[in-house]
Amino acid sequence: QVQFVESGGGLVQPGGSLRLSCVASGINFNIFTMGWYRQAPGKQRELVGTINTHGFTNYQDSAKGRFTISRVNNENTVSLQMNSLKSEDTAVYYCNRAPPVTGDVWGQGTQVTVSS
């Protein structure tokens, strides 16, 4: 059974940092590009960035220069380091394959709230 478990969210002030982690199970993690996604209240889920099997990363414009995705293949983990956080980064953050595979169940996500 495919499963993604996200952690590391919380409440942080603008300009602060958070590091999110995701553990994947039930997939051959080493062969998939992984992505971090987020969904803000009242908005559709969007892709924040991806990391391929070789560690090459790609980010949406709002994340460039502030967010860093990394992975440890032998631990089936992918992380998202977020710096210089803004109120507009407030969302529930998820990890999944990129693109997601039809039929995969999304994890519960981890809430990130940026507020003073």
Image (cartoon, rainbow, N blue to C red):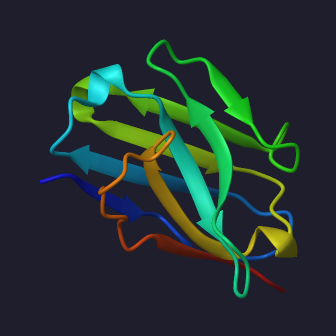
Residue at 27% x, 36% y is 76
Choose top left, top right, bottom left or bottom right for residue 116. Answer: bottom right
Q: Position of residue 22 (x, y in %)?
A: 38, 51
Residue at 30% x, 56% y is 104
Choose top left, top right, bottom left or bottom right for residue 27. Answer: top left
Q: Position of residue 1 (x, y in %)?
A: 11, 54
Residue at the far front in the pictured view: 102
Q: Is residue 87 left or right of residue 28?
A: right
Give the answer, above or below, for where 88 lies relative to 30. Answer: below
Q: Is residue 32 left or right of residue 111?
A: left
Q: Is residue 60 left or right of residue 21?
A: right
Front residue (pair 22, 107): 107
Residue at 38% x, 27% y is 32
Front residue (pair 70, 95): 95
Residue at the far top in the pictured view: 54
Give the answer, above or below, for where 10 lies relative to 19. Answer: below
Count the labels in the image.
0
Give the answer, above or below, for where 93 lies relative to 62. Answer: below
Q: Position of residue 45 (x, y in %)?
A: 63, 67
Q: Is residue 89 left or right of residue 54?
A: right
Choose top left, top right, bottom left or bottom right for residue 93. Answer: bottom right
